[in-house]
Image (cartoon, rainbow, N blue to C red):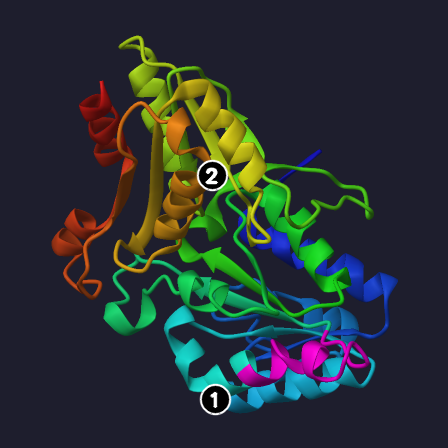
């Protein structure tokens, strides 16, 4: 194990895969000389040169379109969209090209590309640069959607995504970039897509959390343990495909489900998880499912309002207390 930040773990994953496979390259706005808007690509351009770490113009349409074309013709691009709110600029390339190409060619064309997408609020970046948009892309068949919550998973999931034959939307919460944790050093450390993880075992209530809310849920669980409430925390890690069996087994054990996500509540992926459990495990539930999400409003610029807007450990713990 090695202590690395979430950003360093992502960079190590890209470096290892670029060393392993010459078809892997990185592209995006400021990913080269500048090292990435959030410093994630760092010194990769010095190690691999500008042919394999490519700065692009400020055009999400061209970034994603070029990545799709490169992936279809033998490369494995790892492209970066600087902020999740800018996905809308490249909707056609993502939804109609990357997602559908394999199906529309009868499996003759694959699109082995990764789109890295920094998202989330908490740094005062205001509404256009703070959105959580993972639910948009989970709705489109043909896309895999990944959301690591810690450095070890960030490395293992990104390596798995780069090796995958399908397009992977890889979401990274900006606040997590500086979080530090133990990361396996071996080059072949992989976290398989579609496999969730129980981050904390418990018997009284299940919390399913994504992204930064995993750490918030774990903090809330420690508070609740002092009150005699034993919380199980599940991190799906991959939203598509979703490890619904793990969630269902936990709910069958605890009888209670709370879903924590920084997304706005309406149309969120938290709603999809709730629907899946309601369809397949209604009789496991002792009471209605709860969701702790952001309100249905744009992310405020004011730091005071932004903190009031965001889910946090207290809001999660308070929601669990209401269930008891």
Report which residue position mark 1 lands on.
Answer: 58
| Residue shown at the point (48%, 43%) measured from the top left | 179
Q: In this view, does 95 lie above or below 142?
A: below
* Residue 48 circle label: none
- Is residue 275 found left or right of 316 in the rendered image? right
Q: Is residue 243 above or below residue 218?
A: below
Report which residue position mark 2 lands on.
Answer: 280
Q: Can you give x and y, in whole percent of width and height, for residue 119 in the image?
A: 41, 62
Q: Is residue 43 above or below residue 5?
A: below
Q: Can you give x and y, in whole percent of width and height, for residue 244 in the image?
A: 54, 41
Q: In this view, does 247 lie above or below 99?
A: above
| Residue shown at the point (48%, 90%) measured from the top left | 59
Pick whichever of labels 1 and 2 is earlier in the sequence.
1
- Say if residue 122 shows up in the picture: no
Q: Can you give x and y, in whole percent of width and height, for residue 163 in the image?
A: 77, 61
Residues drawn in magenta? 96-111
- Is residue 50 found left or right of 22 in the rendered image? left
How would you rate the neighbour count of disc 2 (Cα within 10 Å): few for under 14, some for 14-19, many for 20 or more?
A: few
Tell me where residue 314 sits by quadrant. top left
**Secondary structure found at label 1:** loop
Q: How far apart are marks 1 and 2 (CA)?
A: 44 Å
| Residue shown at the point (22%, 63%) measured from the top left | 299
110 within the magenta span = yes
- Is residue 17 found left or right of 161 in the rendered image? right
């Amino acid at each position: 194990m090695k202590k690395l930040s979430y950003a360093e773990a992502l960079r190590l994953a890209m470096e290892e895969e670029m060393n392993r496979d010459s078809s892997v390259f990185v592209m995006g706005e400021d990913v080269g000389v500048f090292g990435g808007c959030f410093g994630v690509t760092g010194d990769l351009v010095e190690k691999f040169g500008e042919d394999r770490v490519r700065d692009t113009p400020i055009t999400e349409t061209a970034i994603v379109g070029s990545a799709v074309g490169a992936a279809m013709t033998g490369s494995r691009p790892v492209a970066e969209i600087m902020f999740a709110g800018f996905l809308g600029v490249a909707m056609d390339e993502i939804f109609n090209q990357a997602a559908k190409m394999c199906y529309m060619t009868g499996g003759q064309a694959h699109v082995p590309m990764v789109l890295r997408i920094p998202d989330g609020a908490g740094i005062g970046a205001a509404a256009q640069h703070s959105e959580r948009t993972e639910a948009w892309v989970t709705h489109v068949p043909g896309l895999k959607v990944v959301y690591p919550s810690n450095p070890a998973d960030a490395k293992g999931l990104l390596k798995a995504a780069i090796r995958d034959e399908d397009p992977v939307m890889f979401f990274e919460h900006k606040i997590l970039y500086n979080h530090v944790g133990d990361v396996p050093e071996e080059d072949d450390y992989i976290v398989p897509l579609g496999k969730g993880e129980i981050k904390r075992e418990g018997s009284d209530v299940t919390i399913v959390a994504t992204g930064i809310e995993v750490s918030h849920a774990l903090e809330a669980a420690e508070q609740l343990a002092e009150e005699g409430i034993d919380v199980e925390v599940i991190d799906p890690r991959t939203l598509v495909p979703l490890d619904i069996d793990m969630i269902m087994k936990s709910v069958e054990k605890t009888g209670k489900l709370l879903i924590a996500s920084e997304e706005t509540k309406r149309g969120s992926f938290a709603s999809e998880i709730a629907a899946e459990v309601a369809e397949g495990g209604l009789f496991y539930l002792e009471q209605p499912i709860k969701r702790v999400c952001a309100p249905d409003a744009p992310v405020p610029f004011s730091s005071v309002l932004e903190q009031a807007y965001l889910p946090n450990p207290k809001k999660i713990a308070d929601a669990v207390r209401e269930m008891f």
